[in-house]
Amino acid sequence: MRKIALPLAIIAVALPFLAASPAQAQATRTWVSGTGNDMNPCSRTAPCKTFAGALANNKTAAGGEVNCLDPGGFDTVSITFSVTISCEAGTAGVLATSGAVGIFIDAGASGVVTLRGLDIDGQGTGGVGIFLNSAKAVHIEKSTIRNFRSGFVPAGIVTGGSGTAFMYLADTVISDNSTGMALTTTSGGFKIVSLKNVTIAGSTFDGVNAVSTNVFVNVTDSIISGNGRDGVVTNAPATVNVDRSTLANNTGAALNAAAGGSTIRASGNNIYNNTNGISIGGGAFVQSDGVNKHGNSNGGVAPNTALAQY
């Protein structure tokens, strides 16, 4: 009888400590796999199935990173805190059809989000590839965003919401969308978008559309080609700087400063085979230096010039 009583006494002493044990800590690095399960803890040996599963239920710590163990389809996701999703090891598919948004970013004024190595595909019926609603900064690297052509504002990338946010794109292809990038902001903030080594091609409408005021766009070493309307257009008093890039075979203008008060500065670009090389609306300003321009149907500058240095 004494042999049973002693273990029972030990258990009785230990129970309060067991009950007070903290919950499992959030991981700074989690994993997804094409063969994973979202009921798993998203560890390397027990990965999750989707990006949403890795970010849910406090599995990934704020400021942490989600990696892909192998190729897979990892579904759409809403991001509400600072995080990196990096999948350079293989094809990380995000399929968003029927008007859906592939990746919705609402990380708040201090959130920093990095997306790397993703293949975001709307299959022709998706709404938006990446929608930036709020963040301090968003980095998009070595990714493809394609086939978003359905919904209210179909585009590869859309910015919106109030507050200031920076978006940086590098080594990325945005192709075959309704609009490549539709850049807007509401009162109380700016959207500053920088592109380096980015290809925007095959849009039904514009490659880059600065839709509202307080939008600033910087394009360097990039290709904007084969879009169904303008390569770059300012439809509000926005500012666009284009440097050392190729703008070719766009059905409208390579550069269209359409709105009064808007500014486009271009330096060292190749502007070939567009309907208009540069189009300038009343009250807009275009400054262009060191441009190679050939084969544009209406020559270098469209007839509706207002104020230009060309």
Image: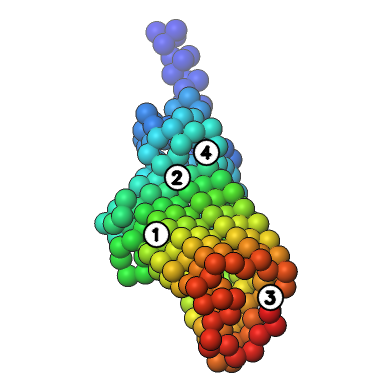
Task: Name the residue tied to disc 2.
Answer: 119
Q: Position of residue 62 (x, y in %)?
A: 57, 50
The residue drawn where x is 44% and y is 63% is 227
The residue drawn where x is 49% and y is 33% is 90
Give me the C-alpha separation between circle 4 and circle 1: 23 Å
Task: Name the residue tied to disc 4.
Answer: 87
- Amino acid type, callout 3: Ser
Residue 304 versus residue 68 in the image, above or below: below
Q: Position of residue 12 (x, y in %)?
A: 46, 26
- Amino acid type, callout 4: Cys
Mark 1: which secondary structure? loop
Q: Nearer the viewer, residue 15 or 140?
A: 140
N-terminal label among 1 and 3: 1
N-terminal label among 2 and 1: 2
Task: Name the residue furthest left.
Answer: 98
Task: Name the residue tied to disc 3.
Answer: 288
Q: How many marks?
A: 4
CB atoms at circles 1 and 3 under 8 Å apart? no
Residue 274 versus residue 28 in the image, above or below: below
> Does residue 182 appear to the left or right of 285 in the view shown?
left
Q: From the viewer's perspective, is the residue at label 2 or at label 1 nearer? A: 1
Is residue 56 at least partly visible in the picture? no
- Amino acid type, callout 2: Asp
N-terminal label among 3 and 4: 4
Mark 4: which secondary structure? loop
CB atoms at circles 2 and 3 under 8 Å apart? no
Give me the C-alpha separation between circle 2 and circle 4: 10 Å
Give me the C-alpha separation between circle 3 and circle 4: 39 Å
Q: Which mark is residue 177?
A: 1
